[in-house]
Image (cartoon, coloured by chain):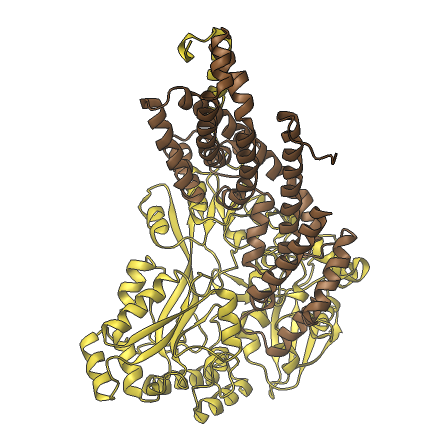
Amino acid sequence: MKFEQMNARPRAALLALAGLGLALAATTLPAQAQPKGSVLVATSVLSQNGDPTATISTADYMMAELVFDGLLNLNEKGKVPGLAESWVISPDGKQIDFKLRKNVKFHNGDDFSAEDVKFTFERILAPDSTHSYRRGFQDSIERVDVVDPHTARFILKNPWPAFFTTARYALAHIVPKKYYEQVGAKAFKEKPVGTGPFKLVDKKAGEWSKFEANTGYWGRVPKVQFVTERLVAEPFTRYAMIEKGEADIASGLTGALLEKVRTNKDLRVIMSPYTGTSGILFNKKEFPQAEDRRVRLAVAHAINRKAISENILGGVCEPATSIISPGTFGYLEGVPLIPYDPAKAKALLKEAGVKPDTKVPFVYHTQAFAALPGAPQVLEAVAGNLEAVGLTIERKSVDTDAWMSMMRGHKAYGIFYAPSGTPDDGGELINTWFALNSAWTPHSVQRPEYDALFKQQQQLADPEGRKKLLQKFVKMEQENLEMVPFLWCSTPYAIGKRVKSWQPAMGSGYYLSLSNLELND
Amino acid sequence: MQALLTMLLLSVIVFGLSRLSGDPVNLMAPMEASAEDIERIRASLGLDKPLIVQYWYFVTNALQGDFGRSIKWDRSAAEMLIERFPATLWLSLASMLLGLALALPVGIYSAVKRDTWFDSAGKIVALLGQSMPTFWFGILLILFFSLWFGLLPTSGYGLDEHIILPTVTLGLFVAAAIMRVTRSAMLDALEADYVRTARAKGVPEWRVIMVHALKNGAIPILTITALQAATILRGAVVTETVFAWPGVGKIAIDAVYGRDFPLVQASVLFMGVIFLVVNFVVDMLYVLLDPRISYIKR
């Protein structure tokens, strides 16, 4: 007897077993869109650090921006007065009086006052502070005094004009002294209380955070009731969630997926403009020929920035004319773009005596991160461009961790990518990449005049004069070409059809400015 | 004893490998952080101590059930894993059930219908199932069932239908291997003398297949099934990421990318324990299936 001749019962059992699998797969149920008034953000990065006095990285703004306010706030227009209504800077630039907003309450009902401002900055400056940018505050702040409940006085060690133009200083989020001291740092981190447009309702570590609108907000009261940020690591899944209407905002999409969003009539791409800038730098110890300006200019002519921004990055980035982008304090208009001209690049290399088989180590980053969208494809294209003009490129693969330790150890390879994810202040960019002992470069840029300019602008209290100085730097660098300008990038968000209008904040990939978001329902 | 040694060895390997892989502070601190700030963060995490001291802390604390705090999420690593374990367990069981439900009937029938079109089709399906990367298959399922046909949610956790796509992704993957082993085990068994004897004495064919042959072919099938339990855990890492399924695998991969040492250590050890338990259960099942196997020394 063969299988066909089996008794009906066991045969049916076998078939039922096989059918079970198919039945499982065929169950049909509609997927759920978010309930009315609720917004779901499918995010590629999730930060749940509830204590802004212990900021680890700019990604921590994800939570801080919703729950807290700074003396200044960041929205779609840029930096605007937040808890400080106005301020007066003393003539010597070493004292700032902040006039604080009245009738502002923390989420727990406590009144906001100058004591909270003093407390917050003292926490950041404290010896045991884990605030990553503590150093910048320490270098400039002597102390904070309470003049009256609505006036906080900053006594500075030196003029600090960059305070107002640099996000990590100006936006320092204010915590409530009373509640913070009452519950302690650890509990505060879990259940943060601020004055911001949203309250933290609940969170699950590594998965999601849920926020509710603060209806008593002093500023623009959110038009949505709930916001959930959910970590979805796979880009395709984030895309699918947007297309299917499960999520309303998806971050971290580039290339083909972003193109799919663009071509879908129900979906839109919205940019947070100028959240990144980058250039190509040289480690002259490893690639000594780069001492010759002609070699650096050859590299500039060799790279097809336009093709990279359009074809690989889908318009998220545009060719840069300088490291100081249009979103950066100190931007200079009218600097010409160095054109893509491989023939000229070849000629320049020949002129400089660089032999065609010269081996050049090249930093090849294998992961994309906020300040480096579309890597490694972008870097592969650059390597290809350089090979096309006759250099022999040795790709040195690094992931983000290895990249960070390489950069911090001043050990970047011959030609390397120099990005910045918070390009808000030109002075800070000079400090990072061009100062004599810059934290990041292998100290290949040895120009005392840059260092002098950096120190001069650091002390200059007058914003207009400072801007002029930074623009002067752009002109000098245009001549010297220590860094080949590469790309200015924005942060793209895919949004679904439920979203009526929304504009994320300017100049930060982590400030969503969700209080201006409006839904169709 | 053996299991304890295995766990100890595993702890050394995990500890060593994660330390070799890099430095979490590099990823945590912002680009502009100064060298002292980085040192300060490193010290606050205890990462400035000599490796052997770090390992000693790790083992002694782990023995007391304390696997440290996740660097990235600032929560107890053990708590995070326990919280996530139900999601992984649920997905693994469902996938294994689906895998067996597909593999056993098809495998058995392929053996019975050797070299027919059904057998060939089974071979192709098994080959596909084994060679298709799970993340790609998962993405295809989302594309077909969520976007094109709009039947199922793309990802997530909480509703019954959320489990279907990840289960199919993992289930088909394990089914393929079990299917092939079932087929060959059954082929061997069906050619054995006792099967001929059974047929000769007039035992109905379904009994011959399902009782006489299957019971004897069960040991390799059980072995491969146990091995597939490990595959499921491995596959869960990828599948959970694609479907945003909040399980142990997803948190493990996030931890690896973030160099979140305590969480990496805890999750790998956790998976190690599960694997040892599965192996133990299988060893016990061997005894039930084959009376010739005994673990009691005579």
Residue nearest the observer in this picture, A359 or A297: A359
Q: Position of residue A256 (x, y in %)?
A: 33, 51
Residue nearest the observer in this picture, A468 or B38: B38
| Image: A327 above or below A252 | below
Q: Residue at x 59, y 67 (%)?
A: B23
Q: Position of residue A463 (x, y in %)?
A: 50, 81
When asked about the image quadrant of residue A106, the answer is bottom right
Letter of the brown chain: B
| Image: A488 above or below A348 | above
Q: Residue at x 49, y 35 (%)?
A: B174
* Residue at the extreme right: A182
Q: Is residue A78 left or right of residue A350?
A: right
Quarter of the N terminus of chain A within the rendering: top left
| Image: B110 above or below A315 | above
Q: Position of residue B294 (x, y in %)?
A: 68, 32
Letter of the yellow chain: A
Q: Is residue A345 visible?
A: yes
Residue nearest the observer in this picture, A114 or A301: A301
When asked about the image quadrant of residue A434, the answer is bottom left
| Image: B120 above or below A502 | above
Q: Is residue A240 left or right of residue B42?
A: left
Total marks shown come to 0
Q: Position of residue B255 (x, y in %)?
A: 58, 55
